[in-house]
Image (tube, helix red, strand yellow):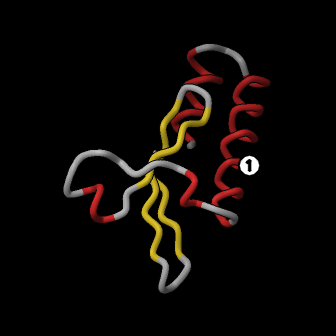
Amino acid sequence: MRGIYEYIVFTLYEPEVAAGQLDRIESAIMSLDEIPERFRLYEKEPWHSRGLRQFPIDNYIFFIFRKLEIKLLQLFG
C-alpha cells in the first residue's frame, strides 16, 4: 500500500487523492471480516483450489487467502 500511496503523491502530485485512496483500501480490507467469500475465486489452478480470492478496489485488484481454522487473512496487492 505504501507503493500506491507514494506513486500517487510523488508521481501524480496528488496527496489528497492518495489519502482518499488509502482510506478506501483500508475500508475494503476491514470489510473482509464480514463475508470474504463474497469475492470470487481466482480462476486458474492451483490458486483456485487453494482458495485464492480476488477483489477490486478502484483501479487495483487485491488477492487474499483465508485460513478458516485460525481466522487469519493474508493480503497481497
Q: Position of residue 21 (x, y in %)?
A: 70, 32
Disc 1: CA contacts within 10 A as few (<14), some (14-19) or many (>=20): few
Question: Going 29% across and 56% down the picture, which residue do you hit?
Answer: 48
According to the image, label 1 marks what residue?
Answer: 27
Compared to 62, does 45 lie above or below? below
Give x and y (percent) for residue 44. Answer: 24, 46
- Closest to the observer: 23 or 56? 56
Instruction: Describe residue 45's horizontal placement relative to residue 64 as left or right.
Output: left
View extreme (left): residue:
46
User: Most extreme residue toward the bottom, as rendered?
Assistant: 69
| Three-letter residue code for mark 1 | Ser
Say which quadrant the N terminus sits in: top right
- Residue sitting farthest toward the top: 12
- Splitting the image into 4 quarters, where does residue 33 fall? bottom right
Image point (35%, 48%), residue name: 42
Q: Position of residue 16 (x, y in %)?
A: 79, 24
Label 1, secondary structure: give it: helix
**Residue at 74%, 48% in the rendered image:** 27
Is 36 drawn above or below residue 56 in the view shown?
A: below
Q: Between 32 and 2, which is closer to the camera in this rendering? A: 32
Q: Is residue 56 above or below residue 41?
A: above
Give the tally of numbered discs. Answer: 1
Identify which residue is drawn at 20% across, 53% down.
Answer: 45
| Nearest to the observer: residue 18 or residue 76 | 76
